[in-house]
Amino acid sequence: NPCYYEAKFWNRRAQREKERDISLPPPMPVFRKVEVVDIEGGDNPCYYEANVRDIKENLLLVTYEKNWRQSAWIDSNLVRCCAPPVHGKFEPNSHDPVEVKARQAPHEPYGWWKAQILAKNTSDTGTLFYVHFEGWDNYDDVVGPDEIRPRNASPSFSLVPLEKAEIKIPKELDPTGLDNALYKDMGNPETIFALYTVSSESEKKNDNSIVVIGKKSAVRNARLLAKMLFKHRNELSKLRKQNQHVQDRLQNQKERLSNCKVLKLPILDGMTGLVIGKGGKNIKRAKKVKGVESIQILDVEKQIIIVAETMAAANEAREILEVIKSTFSVPANIFGRFVGPRYHIIQEIRTDSEVMQIKAGKNKRLVDENNKQVDSGLGNANVVGDWSDQPKHKEVIDLDIIGSPPCVESARMMLQVRMRHLEENKVIMSSRRYVMRQLDTLNNEYGIRGRGRGRGGRPGRGRGRDGQGRGKQASDSVEVEDVQEEKHHIQPQAQQKKKNRRNKKRNKGKEQKVGGEKKQDSKANNSGKKGNKGVSEAHKTELTEVKVETKSKPQRKPKKSYRRKKNKKEDGVESKVDKKTTK
């Protein structure tokens, strides 16, 4: 009956494990128990439950429950699987081999010992078994049905070897709970005996991995499932980050928009495209304004909604997007001079003021002195009384200016300046005409003859009748000159085109004239041949020489219109004389 000293026993084992220098992995969250033979048990050893932590060749590193014994490397021949659970009620008979649950000392856990049933006693209170422990000559005991089981026939791990695999965890994943998730995905297999996470916390690298210990097929399945688990976890982590990012944005947006200013602008009919701009350039330009959060265009409500941090930013975007329409009336009698040839003055104003459009109305309007519209039917009504008593009406043509308010205002100012310029020009021209009329009257009183403008000649030097000139009087010539200057000012390009067309017609007429003279000469020669068959050879040579001269020396171009008419008459007389002489 030996005595067990706890302090000596544990100190001795702790010293022994320190000498072996065994480094244990962190606590295993997922494991399956095995049974380890107690070497100190003698001929009838006891099997204690333990956990496998590592494999090295034929040795297994095992740890005991509650650390009642220090971890140790044990040969795989001494380790086996736990007995499978018994389905139903186990009722052995006498002399059946069984395993009995008992402990050798109070401080040790229970273990399973080999025994044999000597007798069985069944009563109302239950069934009791009288057993004899093998290897012990004088040690028998009475146990109940909960302390007995069939003998474990599982082979040792030397016959069914185990494998170990380390699966690296990606750095972007959190290793917490991956081992438990992998074990659940595998369906809690009985062939996996250890599955835990190991982290190497070194200065150079921080790698995490999952250690799997089990049979070959189970380790292979663990590798495949771990790959899928990492992929799914990575996707889920990205989705969680996106959700968190969206939630943060929502919170920030709420805080920011709660203090924002909202500005609503109406859109005129048919102006939505002008508001947006080509390719949305106006919207993009307005969104680049500092402080503008969003811009919405509602086609149904015909509104623009501007959301900005400050009212100044909203007004700056409003200047870009707001489109208004303004009308500028121009008198119909000066409309051509006002807009210029082919509207080039209006185009310059549109470009400089940066408005979107300046277009003229299709119809004229009748307005009074106060620029108020008058019914067009009043012009055809019968007027009773003096015409001077009736209000003065005038026809105007409207110019529609479309663009942003600052640009429209600039365009209107430029159009007003243009109108004032034409009015000043009209006043100066009228005063000039008045002065010229006075000069004409003064010359007539004293018998001074005015110099006319001759046809085709310079002013005052044309051929006039009785030396007085064929042109108009001086005053009339001045008025004509003024009108011509105005026409040239209004339509310089049109006058130049008319001049070019007139020159082309003249050139064509010259070509036809030259061709007609050649035909007349040929007819004259042919008639001479018919009238007098005995024409001499000298006369023939003269005709050929005349033809050659006409080819080599074409007629000189006349400079003046009256000269051309005179030449035509002279050419006609000469041609008649030639015909008579030839006959």
Image (tube, grey):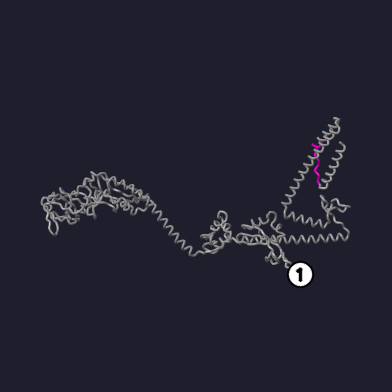
Kindly indicate the quadrant of the structure image that contains residue 318: bottom right
Work out whether residue 436 can be spotted.
Answer: yes
Q: Amino acid at mark 1?
A: Gly
The magenta stretch is 549-559
Q: Which residue is mark 1?
A: 385
Magenta-colored stretch includes residue 553: yes
Q: Is residue 40 left or right of residue 442?
A: left
Work out whether residue 12 can be spotted.
Answer: no
Q: Which x, y percent locates residue 488?
A: 74, 54
Q: Residues within 10 Å of mark 1 (few under 14, many from 20)?
A: few
In this view, the residue in front, 412 or 18, is 412
In this view, the residue in front, 269 or 23, is 269
Q: Is residue 171 left or right of residue 540?
A: left
Q: Secondary structure at mark 1?
A: loop
Kindly indicate the quadrant of the structure image that contains residue 77: top left
Q: Which x, y percent locates residue 118?
A: 11, 52
